[in-house]
């Protein structure tokens, strides 16, 4: 069993030093609670609601820069693996909404968000690589960011790539929902866990930033699709943790004759990789 | 606006005449409530918990046989479209867990379940065709059956094929779940609606059959992922209806810069159509 933790905290846009200090405190608290894997929110060093490209660029750092170096030191000090979001200045000069998995030895993976949300596309370039799946001593950790999680193709790719757990740094902007209903973002994360038989751990944020509020829906979900901790759904810092047997996610059987991945019919799924179909629906089949 | 109805009812295994009578009554009630589309459960003519292949065969009918002929008459009498499950004897002599969309003019589509659940594979052959999408005067109706709905590739194919609504006849066997949690099957249906921006209408059944109980989770879900009616979650007959603007499902925009289908990155999804990956996860990416 491995304690997984997700950190929900306020982030101060434009003040990376303050944000790195805050995440350092949160990582220490998670480690004290026994966590081996600590997940931080999306863009946890920079904040999210940028005034434009120049501000974003001023806050971005290379993958070998300030943020991941700090995380490496934190990982070493606390003997944890950290998965979190940061504002990346690419070697190509472009800006990416990225996330990394870091341990004491260094950076295990850097991932660039492939599905950009709203104004992100005005400042960030989308990534072109699949969600990485990283081997750790306690299991395999897949990584994706926020809106990525709402594309079932993407969560499936992580599961097919061997992920036992999908770590998802997010900044979920607040949206309306019917009373007594969970946010659709949480429902989608639950379904991603259930259809793939994987753990999903989401680190969201709190505290309104430049007029944007957040769902603050941090949650740790088991492979059956049910929350093990959270969703928080309250605008406050929170440290969630759950004791998870990540290797249990490798058993995909769901009945004596069914297996979530083996039951797939990939030979029938070609349409999923085609460009968008036109408005003509499939022809009705009449026998 | 179009009233959509799903019928949850008890089915008597081995007594198609009684079952056709019961569904006729339910269709009449749905039509009285203003429904234009009425969805019936999976295998609504035969029952589900078969003693084996011989019993199943004895209950199966061709697509031009007893069940769909009766539905056509019902559709004509009540001026409705019926989507429901039936036990099909194929022209090839094989048995299929099938569903059809029928109106007054005849059979608009027959679909054979592609993802078989548990002992179904002992008696039924899986279908090899995609989920059909049928044009009706009030919108485009996609069709799939029970476990199919738990494969996000399948619901995505229906949405890419133009479905405004996915009609899902099901027989959801009862499974355990934490108190105060919705069944994972319902969560998956909600997520299928939300990630595709489509309506999803599920007709489940009630009354224990040969020792098997049911979730009885009939539900009508809007394109935002939230229930419009149901889930019932009670072992009793139920007629759910909801007034739906199916054409609204054609607007996939979810922010000023986002569209649920256009935001897909199909060029990155090739792995979804590949056979199952081995146990080697993707190589970590280190920048």
Image (cartoon, coloured by chain):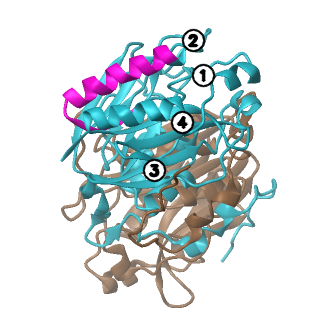
Chain colours: A brown, B cyan
Spatial CA span between label 1 and label 3 = 42 Å
- CB-based contact (under 8 Å), mark 4 and mark 1: no
Q: Which mark is residue B209?
A: 2
Q: Specify whether A123 is left or right of B212.
A: left
Q: Residue B30: within the magenta?
A: yes
- CB-based contact (under 8 Å), mark 2 and mark 3: no
2 or 4: tag closer to the N-terminus = 4
At horizontal 56% and vertical 20% (from top left) the residue drawn is B47
- CB-based contact (under 8 Å), mark 1 and mark 3: no
Q: Nearer the viewer, mark 4 or mark 1?
A: 1
Q: Which mark is residue B146?
A: 4
Q: Are marks 1 and 2 on the same chain?
A: yes
Q: Nearer the viewer, mark 2 or mark 3?
A: 2
Mark 3 lies on residue: A203
4 or 1: tag closer to the N-terminus = 1
Against A207, residue A111 (above or below) is below
Q: Chain of mark 2?
A: B
Q: Chain of mark 4?
A: B
Magenta stretch, residue numbers: B17-39
At horizontal 47% and vertical 14% (from top left) the residue drawn is B18
Of the pair B40 and B207, the residue shown nearer to us: B40
1 or 2: tag closer to the N-terminus = 1
Spatial CA span between label 2 and label 4 = 17 Å
Spot occupied by residue A17 in the image (x, y as percentages of width and height): 41, 68
Q: Specify whether B86 is left or right of B40.
A: right
Against B164, residue B64 (above or below) is above
Mark 1 lies on residue: B48
- Res. A174 visible in picture: no
Spatial CA span between label 4 and label 1 = 12 Å
Spatial CA span between label 4 and label 3 = 32 Å
Query: Crowding at label 2, few (<14), some or many (≥20) Cα neighbours within 10 Å?
Result: some
- CB-based contact (under 8 Å), mark 1 and mark 2: yes
């Amino acid at each position: 069993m491995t304690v997984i933790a997700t950190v929900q905290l306020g982030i101060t846009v434009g003040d990376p030093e303050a944000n790195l200090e805050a995440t350092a405190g949160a990582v220490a608290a998670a480690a004290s609670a026994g966590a081996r894997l600590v997940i931080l929110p999306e863009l946890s060093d920079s904040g999210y609601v940028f005034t434009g490209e120049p501000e974003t660029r001023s806050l971005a750092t290379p993958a070998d820069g300030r943020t991941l170096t700090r995380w490496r030191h934190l990982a070493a000090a606390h003997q944890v693996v950290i998965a979190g979001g940061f504002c990346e200045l690419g070697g190509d000069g472009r800006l990416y909404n990225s996330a990394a998995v870091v341990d004491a030895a260094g950076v295990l993976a850097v991932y660039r968000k492939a599905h950009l949300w709203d104004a992100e596309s005005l400042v960030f370039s989308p990534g072109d690589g699949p969600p990485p799946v990283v081997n750790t001593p306690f299991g395999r950790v897949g990584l994706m960011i926020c809106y990525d999680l709402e594309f079932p193709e993407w969560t499936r790719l992580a599961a097919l790539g061997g992920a036992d757990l999908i770590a998802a740094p997010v900044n979920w902007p607040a949206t309306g929902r019917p009373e007594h209903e969970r946010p659709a973002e949480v429902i989608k994360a639950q379904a991603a866990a259930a259809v793939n038989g994987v753990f999903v751990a989401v680190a969201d944020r709190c505290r309104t930033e430049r007029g944007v509020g957040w769902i603050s829906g941090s949650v740790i979900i088991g492979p059956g699709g049910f929350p093990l901790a959270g969703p928080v759904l309250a605008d406050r810092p929170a440290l969630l943790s759950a004791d998870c047997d990540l290797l249990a996610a490798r058993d995909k059987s769901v009945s004596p004759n069914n297996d979530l991945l083996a039951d797939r019919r990939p030979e029938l799924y070609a349409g999923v990789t085609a460009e968008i179909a036109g408005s003509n629906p499939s022809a009705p089949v009449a026998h």
